[in-house]
Image: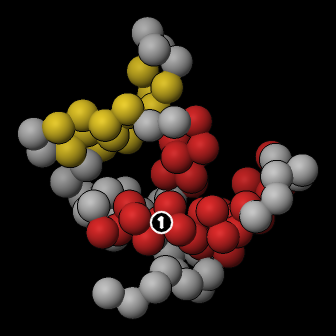
């Protein structure tokens, strides 16, 4: 599988549904047969994926929200690679 690039425009997989769960205060990803509770940063990344925005734009939006986080780009790219392997994004 090729690495995720900054130019790609990803989205939550069409068989999955991302939603905010007010009772737990976190995002959950509903996939066939499983519900995944996401940590804050994973939820923030996935909610920005709309199939139109490039990964570079997603990273920039997160940089604006979290200006003091070091290694943000590498973390986002690594998470998206894992998310694609797990079929959370396409």
Q: Which SS class for mark 1?
A: helix
User: Which percent across, then down, holds residue 54?
Assistant: 59, 75
Q: Is residue 32 left or right of residue 28?
A: left
Q: Is residue 6 visible?
A: yes
Q: Nearer the viewer, residue 34 or 14?
A: 34
Q: Is residue 90 left or right of residue 74?
A: left
Q: Which residue is mark 1?
A: 80
In this picture the colour scheme is secondary structure
User: Which percent across, then down, holds residue 29?
Assistant: 33, 40
In the displayed structure, would residue 73 be above or below residue 88?
below
Position of the N terminus, as image quadrant, is: bottom left
Look at 49% across and 26% down and name the residue there.
26
Q: Is residue 36 left or right of residue 38?
A: left
User: Which percent across, then down, holds residue 21?
Assistant: 42, 21
Q: Is residue 34 left or right of residue 12?
A: left
Q: Residue furthest right?
A: 68
Quadrant hosting residue 81:
bottom left
In the displayed structure, would residue 47 be above or below residue 61?
above
Look at 25% across and 49% down and name the residue there.
16
User: Which percent across, then down, holds residue 77?
Assistant: 57, 70
Quadrant hosting residue 62:
bottom right
């Amino acid at each position: 599988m090729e690495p995720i690039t900054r130019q790609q425009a990803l989205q939550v997989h069409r068989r999955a549904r991302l939603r905010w769960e007010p009772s737990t205060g976190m995002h959950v990803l509903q996939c066939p047969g499983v519900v995944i509770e996401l940590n804050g940063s994973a939820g923030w990344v996935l909610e920005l994926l709309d199939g139109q925005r490039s990964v570079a734009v997603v990273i920039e939006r997160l940089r604006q929200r979290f200006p003091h986080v070091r290694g943000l780009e590498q973390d986002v790219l690594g998470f998206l690679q894992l998310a694609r392997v797990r079929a959370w994004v396409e």
